[in-house]
Amino acid sequence: MKDITTAEAYFLFAVQGKGKIFGHDDYKAACLLSAIFHDMKKSGLIEPAGTKLKIIQKKELPADCAAYLAPVYEHLKELESLELKHIMQDYNSCWSDRHLNALTTAVGTGLSDRGLATKAKLSLFNGRVYFIPYKTAIPSLAAELLVNILYQTPISAEDGFLWLLLEKSSCLPKDFTKEQRRDIQEKVTAAIQSAPEGELARLNEFTDKLLSMIKHYPI
């Protein structure tokens, strides 16, 4: 995707109905975290290690990193345990959306500043900030994703990853036809199977690992 990260694109697709991702939106929160951890790994901040994360360095967030990584990065540095299941509990909770709110507000604010979403408070009392994607944002992203996957060979890991996040969290664009969804899924699946040690296969496996963990405790 051009001029937008996978995490930002996923966020726009995921919030389009509500303007927000809540703690009980377990699959959406897990998929957003998967994209965030991917960004952090690319930036050299963390490294997945089995069922844990390893922080590479505990300094300030480097200036060349996306600003929306800061809330998660700072939270990870405060934790005694970097077990993924414990991290997931902080972001998939029906008791408190504090950490998830900090993350989604950071992602949404960056999109709002670039004219891709409208920032608003829908209530004076709940304190939540909502981000409504601009009318053209979702159709434009969906059209680009469709072309990138169906008409480019090989597909990029980022495009395949975005599709997997949308599919796993039931956020696929409604204007995709049944045939288009089938063709895209077949191409993404083929890309994973043809390179089982590749980036897309690794991202798919890591996302599935996060999704499996949300079933081990009540949301």
Image (spheres, helix red, strand yellow):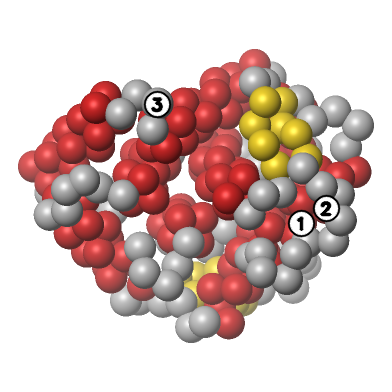
Residues at marks 2 and 1 touching, judged by CB atoms closer than 8 Å:
yes
Above or below residue 102? Residue 91 is above
Residue type (three-letter) at the residue carrying disc 3: Glu
**Label 1 vs 3, first from the N-terminus:** 1
Compare residues 34 and 196 and report the one nearer the observer.
196
Q: Position of residue 185 (x, y in %)?
A: 21, 36
Above or below residue 118? Residue 85 is above
Q: Residue 214 appears in which quarter of the rendering?
A: top right
What is the secondary structure assignment of the residue under circle 2?
Answer: helix
- What is the CA distance from the residue labelled 2 to the residue labelled 1? 5 Å
Residue at left offset 91%, top offset 31%: 80
| Residue receiving disc 3 | 197
Compare residues 147 and 14 and report the one nearer the observer.
147
**Label 2 vs 3, first from the N-terminus:** 2
Q: Nearer the viewer, mark 2 or mark 3?
A: 3
Q: Position of residue 51 (x, y in %)?
A: 67, 21
10 Å crowding of disc 1: few (<14), some (14-19), many (20+): some
What is the secondary structure assignment of the residue under circle 1?
Answer: helix
Whether residue 190 sits left or right of residue 136 in the image: it is left
Q: Residue 94 appears in which quarter of the rendering?
A: top right
Residue at left offset 63%, top offset 73%: 109
| Residue receiving disc 2 | 74
Residue at left offset 41%, top offset 57%: 13
| Residue receiving disc 1 | 71
